[in-house]
């Protein structure tokens, strides 16, 4: 395993535990839940953050982030300014993370430790086990993770000490069962996200938006901006359409540069824009008619939930979790993963029928608000935590 090097500037600025959280627990204290996630601010980190903030009404919650070389100082500072209760743990070695987490658990005394994403859910459960935390939960956020032989050994060792294995979609839960985890302890809790920024999306009528395509996703091996870029050629040749394509997101510089080289090679510089990381994604989405997610695999894509809540017509790659999110095509159009011509046909269907696209977008907006919201997710996890602590059977 290649250890993550610590960011010395961040290590010295760990957010102290508020007095109310650090104090010795009273006999009648509320339930305490500790969420562990990557300091890389992935989708799993966002879910852990939303559960920490949203769960405060039901229980005391603390977010723990494992420092990585690319942990963005600005994001950490934003958490501090927002008053989010969080701790930064060393990430230069997995052993250091586990030891620090053990000490934190002994100090804060959580009832439940929740590990979000790989390998954080392994480290979280080791720390919880060594600190004798009563309950541990694994949350798997993706369809594909690199489980080495040593990590598979850890999974087996931690299995008896894990109450519930959560998949963030039915597709991910199916993968968990397929690895041999006890089926009776595997359950689905759909990811949700904070949709408050899209509360006035109806004030941006579909017909008044730009008929352009927006994809908001980081650049990396999982995402597939290149197929979306390549689809613009048959979209023009077969359908006579040349919409603007805007790609928003940070991530791997190498993958972004490869996408930029592809744009130049196809002569699409006037049609494709690279926006970089954007903090105004809600406003950006609500200015576009079409939101796209071209990807190789997903757990449950929060970017689609946001696009749906924004009132966009959504086109996504026909892979398991995207298909599930879009209800097999009820709330969006599915396009063949990695197939530029099929993507061109799907985009043309949306762009050439704005009336039909607007109707589908409205249905998608309602679905996102009811089933993909942070509030629904917080309630589901809160019910799980209460059931664990109170000894109720898991169904």
Image (cartoon, grey):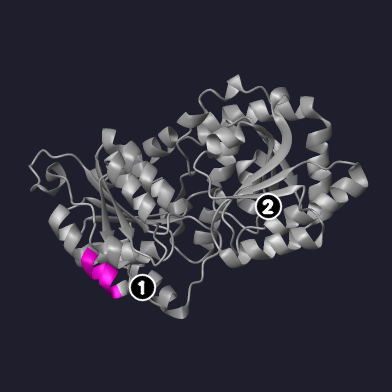
Label 1, secondary structure: give it: loop
Q: Nearer the viewer, residue 271 or 349?
A: 271
Q: Mark 1 against mark 2, which lies toward the viewer? A: 1
The numbered dot on residue 294 is 2
Name the image quarter holding residue 290.
top right
Predominant secondary structure, magenta span: helix
Question: What range of the chain is rendered magenta?
Answer: 95-100
Residue beneath disc 1: 5
Q: Nearer the viewer, residue 83 or 93?
A: 83
Q: Residue at left 25%, top 65%?
A: 127
Please give left or right for residue 145 compared with residue 288 in the image.
left
Q: Residue at left 45%, top 36%?
A: 194
C-alpha separation, residue under disc 1 versus residue under disc 2: 32 Å
x and y percentages locating residue 132 in the rendered image: 19, 62
Q: Residue at left 46%, top 45%?
A: 189
x and y percentages locating residue 80 in the rendered image: 28, 46
């Amino acid at each position: 395993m290649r250890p993550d090097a610590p960011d010395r500037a961040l290590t010295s600025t760990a957010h102290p535990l508020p007095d109310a959280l650090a104090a010795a627990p009273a006999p009648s204290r509320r339930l305490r839940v500790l969420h562990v996630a990557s300091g890389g601010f992935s989708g799993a980190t966002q879910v852990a953050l939303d559960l920490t903030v949203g769960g405060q009404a039901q229980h005391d919650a603390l977010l723990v982030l494992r420092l990585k070389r690319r942990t963005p100082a600005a994001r950490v500072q934003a958490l501090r300014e927002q008053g989010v209760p969080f701790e930064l743990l060393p990430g230069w070695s997995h052993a250091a993370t586990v030891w620090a987490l053990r000490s934190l658990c002994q100090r804060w005394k959580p009832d439940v430790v929740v590990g979000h994403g790989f390998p954080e859910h392994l480290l979280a459960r080791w720390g919880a086990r060594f600190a004798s935390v009563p309950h541990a939960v694994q949350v798997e956020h993706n369809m594909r993770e690199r489980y080495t032989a040593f990590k598979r050994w850890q999974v087996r060792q931690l299995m008896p000490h894990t109450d519930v294995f959560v998949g963030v979609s039915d597709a991910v839960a199916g993968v968990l069962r397929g690895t041999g985890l006890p089926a009776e302890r595997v359950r689905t809790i759909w990811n949700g996200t904070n949709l408050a920024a899209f509360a006035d999306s109806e004030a941006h009528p579909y017909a008044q938006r730009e008929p352009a395509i927006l994809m908001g996703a980081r650049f990396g091996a999982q995402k597939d901006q290149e197929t979306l870029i390549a689809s613009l050629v048959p979209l023009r040749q077969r359908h006579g359409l040349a919409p603007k394509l805007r790609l928003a997101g940070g991530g791997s510089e190498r993958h972004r540069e490869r996408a930029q080289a592809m744009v130049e090679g196809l002569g699409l510089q006037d049609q494709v824009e690279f926006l970089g990381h954007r903090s105004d994604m809600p406003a950006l989405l609500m200015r576009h008619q079409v939101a796209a997610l071209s990807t190789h695999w997903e757990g449950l894509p929060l970017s689609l939930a946001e696009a749906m809540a924004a009132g966009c017509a959504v086109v996504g790659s026909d892979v398991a979790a995207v298909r599930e999110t879009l209800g097999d095509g009820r709330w969006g159009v599915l396009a063949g993963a990695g197939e530029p011509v099929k993507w061109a046909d799907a985009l043309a269907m949306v762009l050439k029928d704005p009336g039909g696209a607007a109707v589908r977008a409205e249905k998608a907006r309602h679905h996102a608000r009811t089933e993909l919201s942070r509030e629904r997710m917080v309630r589901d996890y809160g019910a799980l935590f209460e059931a664990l602590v109170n000894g109720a059977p898991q169904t």
